[in-house]
């Protein structure tokens, strides 16, 4: 009756595909559309098989993930007792402390449980024998495709550092492209630690100096174009501290202005800014030793205004910066917010950020990235995201119906495809082959 009324008054265009959903159908339809729409994971630290040991996978790597090391090392064990242990013993110690002697209730520990369950492995054993023999039996190529299929991921975007000696050697030897692994040119060493790393460029024949003076800007630009040709990156990226300011007279900002932004413009790739990290507040925790700080996002405002021809993919680490980022995304069409980064990637905070973004931006944002460092993490990180998004989208469509416009499965599919795929496809480089890998799981 209600549907007919809405159709007869033209409030609901008759042409839309699919029947209007009843309130009871909305949640299950949203869940199904989320489950059957493959996602493009726009930021990870995963590597294609061609990068060999740089790619982390398996139970020992899963358990020694720096999120779990942070939890483990904030208890009795001192870092100097933990780091000398072989990886296997580190994993055993973390399993015992966080999964046997305690209930794995944190997001990161629950993630391990979800991965074990996904492979039908026991989740409550006192040791890791069964899990280890399972992962030992996997062949990497097949395992990667299976894991992506289980996680509903069609392609991941890597984090590639041209100044990392081990990784650079692989690229310089030539890497066959892989449809499911896209490259990114990560610039932290150039933009945040130039005085430590400039000699690597000099060693590759670029006329640069410690102060990045004279021709250095143009030479860095040449370096970026050369690595663009080598990597075909879908964007360039840098993580910036909470103290980041623009404009301000630093070497980093000079290189940003003279080399990175012009190169991104010419090559038509966005620059990803991940803002708000406080590196190594506790160095004894190594990768687990970073923290966050609230940034002054006027730096971002100035960049978006001063460089309208550049596109900025932005994620911020502090909860207090999330609302500002949403507002800036409404002010600048060259700004696309993406993901709930790192310490934000907890279901309760993802829910808060995503509801705010939908209320303020509709579907013009990229809701999440996994930041996976270990292959199988994509399984639980996307499972969590789909679970949280299902609640939020269902609530949103219920409110829309209440306000006077019913929804169809087609509407939901269009929105989810936008959130999971087409925003990322539209916002990454010209030669991006993100869209090659199929969108729908059969
Ligand atoms: O800068 C980054 O890309 C961060 O995501 C990483 O440095 C961080 O260690 C991480 O793994 C967060 O999830
Ligand atoms: Zn990352």
Image (tube, rainbow, N blue to C red):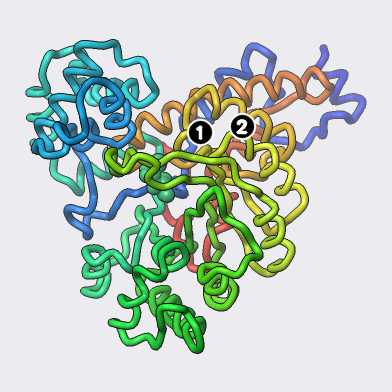
Vertical arrangement, residue 328 with respect to residue 308, above or below: above
| Mark 2 residue CB less than 8 A from any atom of ligand 1 | no
Q: Nearer the viewer, mark 2 or mark 1?
A: 1
Q: Is residue 240 visible?
A: yes
Q: Position of residue 120 (x, y in %)?
A: 21, 20
Badge 1 marks a residue whose secondary structure is helix
Residue drawn at (47%, 27%) of the image: 346
Q: Are marks 2 and 1 in contact (CB under 8 Å)?
A: yes
Q: Mark 1 points at which residue?
A: 344
Q: Residue 78 carries which label?
A: none
Quadrant of the snapshot with the C terminus: top left
> Closest to the observer: 364 or 283?
283
Rendered view: 140 above or below 25: below
Residue under the point 17% across and 36% down: 80
Which of the 4 quarters of the picture holds residue 269? bottom right
Mark before the other along the chain sequence, 2 or 1? 1
Decide: is 142 above or below 111. below
């Amino acid at each position: 009756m209600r549907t007919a009324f809405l159709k007869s008054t033209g409030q609901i265009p008759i042409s839309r595909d699919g029947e209007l959903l009843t309130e009871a159908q909305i949640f299950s339809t949203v869940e199904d559309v989320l489950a059957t729409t493959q996602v493009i994971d726009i930021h990870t630290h995963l590597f294609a098989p061609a990068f060999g040991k740089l790619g982390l996978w398996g139970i020992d790597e899963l358990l020694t993930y720096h999120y779990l090391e942070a939890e483990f090392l904030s208890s009795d064990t001192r870092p100097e007792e933990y780091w000398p242990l072989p990886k296997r013993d580190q994993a055993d110690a973390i399993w015992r402390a966080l999964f046997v002697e305690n209930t794995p209730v944190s997001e990161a520990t629950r993630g391990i449980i979800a991965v074990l369950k996904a492979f039908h492995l026991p989740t409550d054993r006192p040791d890791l024998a069964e899990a280890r023999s399972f992962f030992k039996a996997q062949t990497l190529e097949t395992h990667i495709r299976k894991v992506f299929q289980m996680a509903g991921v069609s392609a991941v975007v890597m984090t590639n550092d041209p100044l990392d000696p081990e990784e650079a050697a692989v690229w310089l030897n030539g890497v066959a492209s892989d449809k499911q692994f896209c490259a990114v040119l990560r610039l932290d060493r150039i933009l945040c630690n130039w005085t430590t790393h400039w000699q690597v460029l000099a060693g590759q024949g670029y006329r640069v100096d410690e102060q990045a003076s004279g021709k250095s800007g143009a030479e860095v630009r040449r370096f970026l174009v050369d690595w663009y040709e080598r990597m075909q990156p879908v964007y360039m990226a840098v993580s910036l501290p909470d103290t980041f300011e623009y404009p301000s007279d630093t070497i980093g900002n000079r290189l940003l202005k003279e080399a990175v932004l012009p190169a991104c413009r010419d090559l038509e790739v966005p620059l990803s800014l991940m803002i708000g990290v406080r590196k190594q507040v506790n160095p004894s925790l190594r990768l687990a030793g970073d923290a966050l700080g609230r940034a002054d996002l006027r730096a971002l405002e100035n960049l978006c205004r001063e460089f309208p021809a550049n596109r900025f993919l932005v994620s911020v680490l502090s909860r207090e910066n999330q609302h500002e980022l949403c507002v800036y995304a409404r002010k600048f069409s060259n700004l696309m917010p993406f993901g709930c980064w790192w310490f934000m990637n907890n279901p309760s905070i993802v829910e808060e950020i995503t509801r705010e973004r939908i209320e303020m931006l509709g579907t013009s944002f990229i809701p999440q990235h996994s930041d996976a460092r270990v292959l199988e993490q994509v399984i639980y990180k996307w499972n969590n995201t789909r679970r949280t998004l299902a609640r939020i989208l269902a609530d949103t469509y219920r409110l829309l119906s209440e306000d006077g416009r019913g929804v169809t499965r087609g509407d939901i599919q269009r929105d989810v495809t936008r959130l999971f795929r087409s925003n990322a496809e539209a916002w990454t480089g010209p030669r991006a082959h993100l869209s090659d890998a199929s969108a729908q799981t059969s």
